[in-house]
Amino acid sequence: MNSSTTLISLENIAIQFPKQDGHGILEVVKDLSFRLPKADIACLLGPSGCGKSTVLRAICGFEPLQAGEIKIYDKTVSSKSIFISPAERKVGMVFQDFALFPHLTVLENVIFGLRTGAPVERNKVGLQWLKRVSLADKAQAYPHELSGGQQQRVALARAMAPEPDLILLDEPFSNLDIDLRERLATEMRDILKANNVTALLVTHDQFEAFAIADHIGVMNDGKIIQWDSPYDLYHKPNSRYVAEFIGRGVFIKGQTQAGGAVEIELGQLQLEDGEQMSPGKEIDVLLRADDIQHDDASPMLAEVVRKAFRGADFLYTLRLDSGQEVFAFVPSHHNHAIGEKIGIRLGADHVVTFKQ
């Protein structure tokens, strides 16, 4: 990842709307900051209503700021006193519904935003971008003749054709079949990286975020709770909110032991290097589904309470002797019945803890 040049920075921005009943102000975005290096891909991840799409609209120039500033290449494009029009920001947008013109061919859609050059030159540029998204053979087709994934790539080519400094993507996979989303997210990442494009997307789906982003900002209630790499978000959440939002896991009670360990119902875990806690303290330990492994030879048993078939594996909900429920991913050839007791063991190679 290129961390030498900051392409866009948001510094302590705030966005407010009047409440629908006409009484008071609704704070949609609160004191939000992040920096995105050139040629990197970032994602704002959070539940509906957390403010992530509003941030995208502010970067485009569609929402004013009540505080803070937005800079592109260190030039302020939005603040309380400065406003650069959307057309002058060199920002491209891929909309949730792709927003392709149904009466135009694929090529005509791609070159729609090219404002200069002779028609022959614009067509040449459009065909180059269609080639980059592997759709050159669809240049004369119409949007209704394409699959959802192909339409998405056309929308991406159209956004990239004017060569903006930044591409914004608003829930780009939400209209696609769920089994296509992760694959298409990976394809989109490959296209953006191959063309050295800086991009910011918003989504509520963590698997899409993991598949495409170099940096992820987990949002809630108008704020970024943690801005980090996908790996560190998963393995080093900075709060209970992030720990619960990212991955599938539960908190289980534990007690610290001498020598930097913690004892839980399933056994003993070693705390991270440098993490010291005095013995005898009650803490909560995060256990995710990949921290518990199925093992027929293990004397430790858990009852299958629920199971969800996921193709390559099952997601089992298991009840321990204490009544505590935990999750476990188990290969799908281990098809156990509800109520059956199965052998399990701890497979956690890192420990995430929070004070009770």
Image (spheres, grey):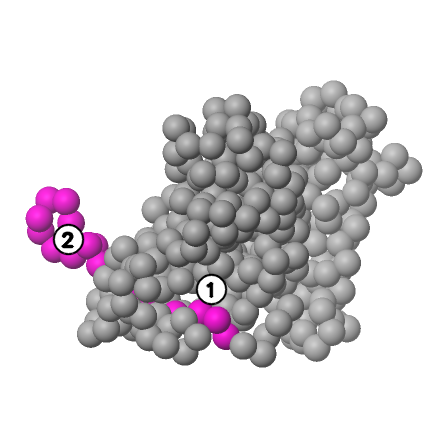
Residue at 27 percent of width and 67 percent of height:
84
Residue at 23 percent of width and 73 percent of height:
82
Q: Is residue 143 left or right of residue 57?
A: right
Q: How far across and how far down the image is residue 160, in percent?
A: 50, 53
Q: How far across and how far down the image is residue 115, in percent?
A: 37, 53
The relative height of residue 328 versus residue 235 in the rendered view (above or below) is: above
Which of the 4 image quadrants contains residue 262?
bottom right
Report the residue marked by disc 2: 18
**Nearer the observer, 168 or 136:** 136
As drawn, the residue found furthest toward the right would be 297
Residue at 75 percent of width and 54 percent of height:
348
Q: Is residue 20 magenta?
A: yes
Report the residue marked by disc 1: 165
Neighbourhood count class around disc 2 (C-alpha, 10 Å): few under 14, some 14–19, many 20 upward: few
Residue at 68 percent of width and 33 percent of height:
315
Q: Is residue 13 left or right of residue 157?
A: left
At mark 1, the secondary structure is loop
The disc labelled 2 sits on which kind of residue? Pro
Magenta stretch mostly in which secondary structure?
strand
At mark 2, the secondary structure is strand
**Nearer the observer, 7 or 211:** 7
**Nearer the observer, 14 or 134:** 134
**In the picture, which quadrant includes the N terminus?**
bottom right
The disc labelled 1 sits on which kind of residue? Asp
In the image, which residues are magenta? 6-27
As drawn, the residue found furthest toward the top would be 337
